[in-house]
């Protein structure tokens, strides 16, 4: 590694940490808005409490969402023969994401860090179209899945908040729970305990989902710049993974391939060829440390191609005649095989945990006021705050379980909107604030796509 590449690598890692730091204070208000606004917890105590739970969330969240971020860009794009192109890509997407997040935070507009990051990645992929005329620089299957999660979640949060508020009214008859917070006056202890709990769960699940995005960004950097060192998990037994891929090949090969269409045939051939290459390459090897550095990325490519192709065949049960038992086995084998390539070193997880936790402890004031006072025509009540945070906790937890990124901001702000509508209908929303939030939601993707794509082309030209 040349001195120039090393310096740029350090800059990229700093930008990834900065993104997660900004993500922390950008999204902090979503977790602490209710407890601060309702006087249930002092601001300093609330942000420290939220920061610690964000930290714990990252540490315990796994890396499913992180790998979803990495897999948005195909390996051919992620690892270029010219390392400066990979660095240009990483710097462009991180700088564009930081600019948009910092800008919306400055104006006190709740916006989605997830949307920002996805838009930046798509901008990189689409910019390749201007270079080679092909639209294959984005993993469109993964991008579509992610897009649906980000699109549907605000509407789900809006509807679920209405349901939860009605459930509260059915079982909690104490009128004080539905009153607006009185400035400087603490609510009863039982209300404070509810809001402490909901704040904590949002913070924890935010760490599990948003923290993984930072882990994914760092892994994207490491794989792009040093693919030989970070392509494979050195602690995983190569022969065990070989048993998984051979099992995948055996299940797929046993089907009636005469019923395959063009796509199924392509995926079938991918599995066969890459299984053969992987099995031969590790025939006498046990761990990745025994593989030549220059050959490790090819093994990563084998596993990614095999599991992706098998996953596609698994989804298309109409043309792939396998039993339910075989399908369950195939799914298990795919997940087991991914262990070799879906990993993150402990230092990466700890670094991102600290960055998110520290970021969570500052910058909360701008968005708290928007959440508490400017979404509805009435100030937020205790019940409305609890409803919105329960909605956010459920939404983020489910998204993390399914390994897709979701917007904490959109879940919580849509929950607040739903709780306001549940009380007095649509007329209870402040049109100007809701319009600004909606515009930020709509504009995030196109703005970040254009910004990151333009920066990538600029950096690529400068570095070459």
Image: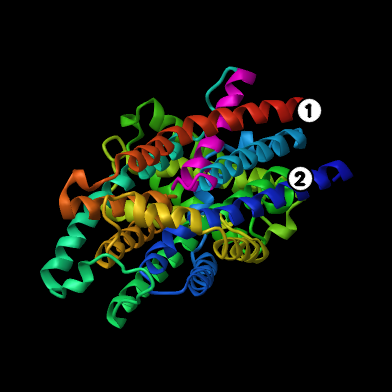
- Is residue 154 visible from the viewing direction of this image? yes
- Specify the quadrant that holds the C terminus: top right
The residue to which callout 2 is attached is: 294
Between label 2 and label 1, give the one nearer the viewer. 1
Q: Residue at x 57, y 46 (%)?
A: 102
> Where residue 419 sits in the image (x, y, percent)?
24, 55
Q: Residue furthest right?
A: 3
Residue neighbourhood size for the residue with mark 1, other residues' Cα within 10 Å, grouped as few (<14), some (14–19), many (≥20): few
Looking at the rendered structure, the number of numbered marks drawn on it comes to: 2
Q: What element does badge 1 sit on?
A: helix
Q: Can you say whether 44 is above or below 110 in the image?
A: below
In this view of the protein, which residue sits in the foreground, 201 or 71?
201
- Give the spatial CA distance, label 2 vs label 1: 28 Å
In this view of the protein, which residue sits in the foreground, 278 or 297?
297
Q: Residue at x 41, y 38 (%)?
A: 441
Q: Can you say whether 59 is above or below 134 in the image?
A: below
Q: What element does badge 2 sit on?
A: helix
- Is residue 337 visible from the viewing direction of this image? no
> Where residue 60 sits in the image (x, y, percent)?
50, 69
Q: Residue at x 27, y 50 (%)?
A: 377
Q: Is residue 308 magenta?
A: no
CB of mark 2 within 8 Å of CB of mark 1? no
> Residue 121 lies in what quarter of the image?
top right
Q: Is residue 119 magenta?
A: yes
Q: Tell me if 382 is positioned left or right of 201 in this view.
A: left
> Where residue 227 sits in the image (x, y, percent)?
71, 46
Mark closest to the chain's N terminus, 2 or 1: 2
Main secondary structure along the magenta-highlighted residues: helix
Of the numbered discs in the image, which one, if any, rests on residue 462? 1
Magenta stretch in the rendered image: 106-132
């Amino acid at each position: 590694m040349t001195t120039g590449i090393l310096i740029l690598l350090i800059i990229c890692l700093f930008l990834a940490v900065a993104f997660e730091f900004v993500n922390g204070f950008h999204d902090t208000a979503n977790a602490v808005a209710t407890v601060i606004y309702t006087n249930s917890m002092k601001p300093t105590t609330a942000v420290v409490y939220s920061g610690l739970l964000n930290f714990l969330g990252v540490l315990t969240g796994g890396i499913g969402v992180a790998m979803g971020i990495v897999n948005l860009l195909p390996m051919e794009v992620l690892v270029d023969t010219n390392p400066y192109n990979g660095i240009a890509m990483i710097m462009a997407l991180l700088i564009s994401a930081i600019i948009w997040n910092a800008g919306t935070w400055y104006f006190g507009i709740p916006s989605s860090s997830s949307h920002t990051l996805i838009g930046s990645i798509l901008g990189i992929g689409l910019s390749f179209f201007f270079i080679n005329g092909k639209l294959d620089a984005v993993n469109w299957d993964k991008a579509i899945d992610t897009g649906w999660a980000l699109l549907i979640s605000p509407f789900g949060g809006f509807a679920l908040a209405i349901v939860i508020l009605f459930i509260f009214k059915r079982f909690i008859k104490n009128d004080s729970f539905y009153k607006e917070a009185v400035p400087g006056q603490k609510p009863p202890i039982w209300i404070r305990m509810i809001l402490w709990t909901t704040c904590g769960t949002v913070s924890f699940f935010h760490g599990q989902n948003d923290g993984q995005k930072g882990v994914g960004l760092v892994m994207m950097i490491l794989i792009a710049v040093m693919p030989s060192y970070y392509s494979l998990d050195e602690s995983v037994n190569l022969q065990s993974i070989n048993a998984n891929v051979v099992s995948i090949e055996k299940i797929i090969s046993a089907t009636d391939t005469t019923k395959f269409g063009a796509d199924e045939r392509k995926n079938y051939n991918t599995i066969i060829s890459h299984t053969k290459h992987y099995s031969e390459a590790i025939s006498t090897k046990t761990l990745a440390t025994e593989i030549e550095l220059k050959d490790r990325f090819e093994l990563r490519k084998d596993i990614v191609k095999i599991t992706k192709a098998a996953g596609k065949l698994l989804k298309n049960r109409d043309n792939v005649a396998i039993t339910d038992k075989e399908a369950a086995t195939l799914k298990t084998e795919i997940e087991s095989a991914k262990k070799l390539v879906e990993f993150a070193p402990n230092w990466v997880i700890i670094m991102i945990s600290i960055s998110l936790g520290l970021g969570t402890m500052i910058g909360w004031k701008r968005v708290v006021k928007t959440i508490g006072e400017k979404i509805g025509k009435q100030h937020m009540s205790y019940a409305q705050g609890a409803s919105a945070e329960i909605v956010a906790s459920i939404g983020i937890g489910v998204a993390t379980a399914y390994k897709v990124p979701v917007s904490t901001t959109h879940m919580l702000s849509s929950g607040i909107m739903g709780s306001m509508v549940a009380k007095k209908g649509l007329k209870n929303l402040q049109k100007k604030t809701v319009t600004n939030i909606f515009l930020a939601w709509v504009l995030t993707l196109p703005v970040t796509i254009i910004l990151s794509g333009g920066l990538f082309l600029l950096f690529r030209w400068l570095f070459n």
